[in-house]
Image: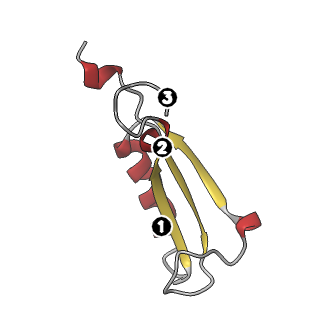
């Protein structure tokens, strides 16, 4: 198995209603929608796209993909922090 296949690339999908359209500042942090954690960008993007399309009528609603693996292993060596 290649080194890339052994890496666990976790992605968090979440969203919520923004306080205004200029900032990534949420109206209520307590009301954030945590969609889930996904093992690939492709799966995360599919979940993100579904949520984004389902809320298209609310201009203040935004969903994001966070690359958790970049926080857990910032230098990419496979070791924590």
Q: Position of residue 49 (x, y in %)?
A: 42, 60
Q: Which residue is depicted at the point 39% across and 52% down?
A: 45
Q: How many marks?
A: 3
According to the picture, the residue beneath numbered tag 2 turns out to be: 71
| Placement of 73 over or under 22, stated as above or below | above
Query: Mark 1 near mark 2, Cβ–Cβ under 8 Å?
Result: no
| Placement of 40 over or under 31, stated as above or below | above
SS at circle 3: loop
Label 3, residues with CA under 10 Å away: few <14, some 14-19, many ≥20? few
Disc 1 and disc 3: Cα gap in Å? 32 Å
The nearer-to-camera label among 1 and 3 is 3
According to the picture, the residue beneath numbered tag 3 turns out to be: 80
> Which mark identifies residue 52?
1
Identify which residue, 77 or 37, lies in the foreground.
77
Disc 3 and disc 2: Cα gap in Å? 9 Å
Q: Which residue is depicted at the point 54% across and 42% down?
A: 37
Q: Which residue is depicted at the point 39% across and 38% down?
A: 40
The nearer-to-camera label among 1 and 2 is 2
Label 1, residues with CA under 10 Å away: few <14, some 14-19, many ≥20? some
SS at circle 1: helix
Identify which residue, 47 or 70, lies in the foreground.
70
> Which comes sooner in the sequence, label 3 or label 2?
2
59 horizontally vs 40: left or right: right
> Which comes sooner in the sequence, label 1 or label 2?
1
> Which comes sooner in the sequence, label 1 or label 3?
1
Q: Quadrant of the N terminus?
A: top left
Q: Position of residue 18 (x, y in %)?
A: 59, 79
SS at circle 2: helix
> Which mark identifies residue 1?
none
Label 2, residues with CA under 10 Å away: few <14, some 14-19, many ≥20? few
């Amino acid at each position: 198995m290649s080194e890339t296949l052994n890496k666990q690339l976790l992605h968090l999908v979440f969203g919520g209603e923004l306080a205004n359209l200029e900032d990534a500042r949420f109206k209520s942090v307590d009301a954030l929608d945590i969609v889930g954690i996904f093992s690939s960008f492709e799966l995360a993007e599919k979940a993100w796209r579904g949520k984004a399309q389902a809320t298209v009528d609310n201009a203040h609603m935004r969903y994001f993909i966070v690359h958790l693996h970049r926080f857990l292993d910032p230098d990419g060596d496979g070791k924590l922090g």
